[in-house]
Amino acid sequence: MFKKNNSAIEKIQLEITRFKKENPELNHFVVAYSGGADSTLLLEALFQFKPDKLTAIYINHHLHANSNAWQEQCSQFCCSRGINFFAIDIEVLKRKGKSLEASARELRYKHLFEYLDEHSCLLTGHHQDDQFETYLMRMIKGTTLNGLQGIRRYRKLKKGHLLRPMLNIRRAEIVHELNTLKIAFIEDPSNLSDDFDRNKIRNNITPLLNHHFPNGSNNLVRTINEINQQLTFVHSEYESKIKEITCKGFIDESIKSIPVSLRRGLIKRLIYVVSNKHPSDFLISLILEQFDTKSFASKKLFEINKIEFWVFKNKIYFFEKLDLQINQYYGEIEFEVARDSVNVLPIEWSLNHLKVTNIKNINKIIPWNASRHKTLKNILNEKNIFPWLRSYVPLIYYKDKLVAVSNLCVSDLAREQIMGEKNYKVKWDVPLQPYL
């Protein structure tokens, strides 16, 4: 059993013990090892924990003159303990809209995840000071509800798990333990530079707060835990409603049954789930405003990350953007020979003379058994064809005359040519639900 006042290593091992009990299938721990104080103590704690398999991975960004020397130091540390060690060389390129720091982090995790399988767990050395700095940075720059959760202790990955077992340990405690154990670690001089936003907070703001509020980071950890407990409940409520909405493919007035205080959060979460992109406040308001009006006008509201949101018949539909050229039609048209004499095309008409297109040379047609023309708009309205599909509804022409609007309407001209029992029946699968 661990003592009440555990050492930093014992705290790490306690977290891993709990996690291992929750996931007994784990047999491989992978440490993101930079040689810094946090990842060094984490690796030492795991080495003493004696797992079935332990691997340390050093990501060499080649962003510092000492990168190769640090790699060698990490290699020697692992060799002295018989720990599997891998070094990965990566080239970090700054991408538009992302800092060099963010680009490096994204690329780093991409390579680390490749070493995992269903029985693996990746561990990182994020500690309480990192949590404190991250929270401050997010609050200063603005964040989402999820951002208030801070650095997450655990995340299930596509393959394996991600665990951060040191979030309740201060960096001073980590350094003290390493010095006590006489274990050397790397001090990255770039941490002293104010070129990065995190360093500006770490070097200028955090020391001042710690001086005046020594228990600030401890209090923040408790606050984050409280937020996470509340968000777990809120998210469970959101997820059940989002599942219901996505199964239908539209938002309707039932959203009014949700308390106003939760409605914006639900819409924000829904848009993110279907588009994988956080929406602006304007887009959220645009959806909610529709349900404050007496009637909905059919229109496209907006598009986000190739997901379109449309208003139609007092509902807001969302779906993946239809990837068709302007001169293409939607779906497949077939002409089936059938013993039918109603709403069919004459079998005497050669299929070679039937042309299927969505190009509207004529926008009116006299339907079968009708005496007056109807516009395409009227026909499509009557048949409840979604407005986003109307430009792509297949039209059938015979010798340049419009004789059918897919299988929705056949021209009176065709009736005059019907001679026998067998004729062409038009088949077209009318989409009754949005395509997701």
Image (cartoon, rainbow, N blue to C red):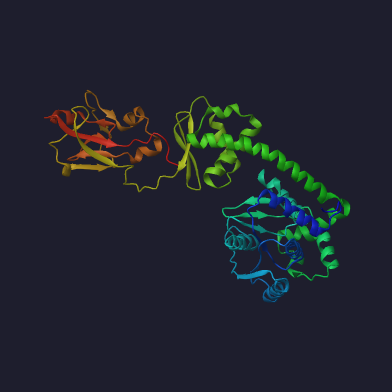
Q: Quadrant of the C terminus?
A: top left
Is residue 191 among what the camera can see?
Answer: yes
Question: Where residue 96 sits: x, y (%)?
Answer: 57, 60
Is 11 positioned to the left or the right of 427 in the image? right
Identify which residue, 318 or 282, lies in the foreground: 318
Give residue 111's position: percent from left, percent from top: 59, 63
Q: Left or right? Give the position of 173 relative to 142.
A: right
Vertical position of residue 331 compared to residue 154: above or below: above
Residue 69 rendering spot, x and y as whole percentages: 70, 76
Residue 346, by quadrant, is top left
Residue 340, position as x, y percentages in the image:
19, 29
Going 64% across and 51% down the picture, which residue do you hit?
155
58 left or right of 172?
left
Q: Residue at x 73, y 64 (%)?
A: 47
Number of residue marks: 0
On the image, which quarter does residue 36 sit in?
Answer: bottom right
Relative depth, front residue between 4 and 345 = 4
Q: Say which residue appears at 73% left-offset and 74% top-offset.
A: 80
Direction from residue 356 to residue 388 in the image, left or right = right
Q: Let me know if residue 143 appears in the view.
A: no
| Viewer-proximal residue among 65 and 203 | 65
Q: With respect to residue 137, does 59 lie above or below?
A: below
Q: Residue at x 83, y 70 (%)?
A: 182
Quarter holding residue 239: top right
